[in-house]
Amino acid sequence: MDSPHSFEDGLTALLPRLRRFAHALSRNAADADDLTQATVERALRSRGQWEPGTRLDSWLYRIMRNIWIDTVRSRGRKEDLHAPVEEAERIGEDPRRAIEASIDLRTAMNAMQQLPDEQREIVALILIEGLGYRECSEILGLPLGTVSSRLVRGRNALLKMIGE
Amino acid sequence: MVNDETFFAWLDDELDAAEAARVAAEVAADPRLAAIAGEHRAMQDRLKGGFDTLLDEPVPTTLVAAIRSPRPAEIIDFAEARGRRAPRRWSFVAQLGSIAATLVIGVLVGTGLPRPQSGSPVEVRGGKLYASASLGRALETQLASAPEANVRIGLTFRDHAGSICRSFTGIASSGLACRADGRWQLRGLLATPQGQATDYRMASSVDPALAALIDSTMAGEPFDARQEHSAREGNWK
């Protein structure tokens, strides 16, 4: 694998994966784009805090996850009444309807929507982003055992929703 | 019988060689376990396949542009605001009039202002508006290069009287505060337009009314990171 020539090159190369993680966390295309934008901006402002030689992707995933948590918290305080909009949108939609060899993004996001937050972020990092348990536990600041038990619960729930 | 955590760790290739071989043997000998492994692999493929469609999409140009732009967005916005300086007085007033949803609170606030609620970024003392404890702390300690969850510091500079001023953006409001007698006096406070009140949208661009206020307040150039840092060391004097 080529090592990126600069911080900017590395960040640019990781944009597609950052967008994927943003969609998995937020389950909403508009939120995902805003979240990716905010992550890029914070990464650029905080670039001095990234240690060259360490994984840039893990550092960016951590920034994105922290921004998302802050967002959810501030919405929880201020935007309680807005939450049911998305909720209403998916009522009556059974993700199991689309049981095929492949599923589309919307179905995948709907399935993620059903998971508790603490399982969703782990599923996103390990099953979708392909990170190892250890990287995941470092990004989230959780013990390995917690990561692995939440992952078991998350993937069992997903199997019921989008399994064969 | 292998437990769930170990079984899935094997599926995810997380076990050391010896343990992986032990689980593999157990799965090979148990058709039920082998079927579960197959189901979970297929489920992961489907889930990941759904999200992987994003990898084939072109990345929004705004993201690439943000990375390629030479300076932080706020500075650029500010420079643009300065570039439009000629009709400044007129346009500032026009902008204020046109931003119906924006609340601007001036320096001298009458006694009619409601008492601040807890969590308010401001408090009134002697008829003047000051930063509350939490906003004051952010203005006191934060650097523009190290934004925190609730308040982001924008520009730091001196006004025409030589006081240090700092622009800030919070979850629901943005504004400008200047140092006066060891406190942060508000020169302006603007409500964040509705729909932009989530903190991750904080000030990728500055409200034009705030940019204009900064423009008319600032003497000289904004501080760079080093000047900002030493101003903090010098207690903003």
Image (cartoon, grey):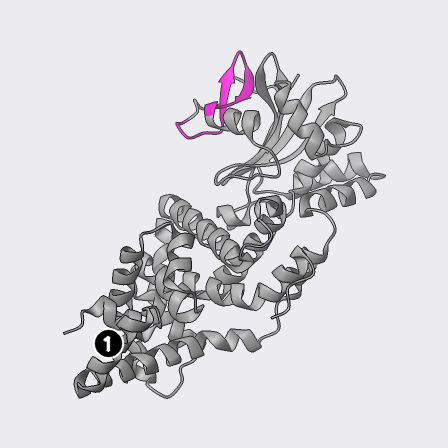
Q: Is residue B47 above or below residue A47?
A: below
- Amino acid under disc 1: Val
Image position, residue A125 (x, y; %): 41, 64
Q: Is residue B124 magenta?
A: yes
| Residue at (37% x, 43% y) in the render | A77
Quarter of the image containing the C terminus of chain B?
top right
Question: Mark 1: which secondary structure?
Answer: helix
Residue B112 visible (yes or no): no
Image position, residue B103 (x, y; %): 57, 35
Q: Is residue B228 above or below residue B108?
A: below
Using a 10 Å C-alpha cutoff, classify the residue at mark 1 as few (fewer than 14 neighbours), some (14 to 19) or many (20 or more). many
Q: Is residue A37 above or below residue B55?
A: above
Q: Is residue A52 above or below residue B31?
A: above
Q: Is residue B40 magenta?
A: no
User: What is the tally of numbered marks visible in this picture?
Assistant: 1
Q: Is residue B8 left or right of residue A41?
A: left
Which chain does the residue under circle 1 lie in?
B
Identify the residue position indicated by label 1 in the image: B23
Image position, residue A110 (x, y; %): 36, 71
| Residue at (77% x, 20% y) in the render | B160
- Quadrant of the rendered structure where residue B82 is? top right
Image position, residue B90 (x, y; %): 78, 37
Q: Going by the picture, which residue comes out furthest to the front? A: B18
Quarter of the image containing the N terminus of chain B?
bottom left
Q: Going by the picture, which residue comes out furthest to the left? A: B1
Q: Going by the picture, which residue comes out furthest to the right? A: B86
Magenta span: B117-133
Residue A29 visible (yes or no): yes
Asked whether A116 or A121 is in front, the reply is A121
Q: Is residue A77 left or right of residue B100?
A: left
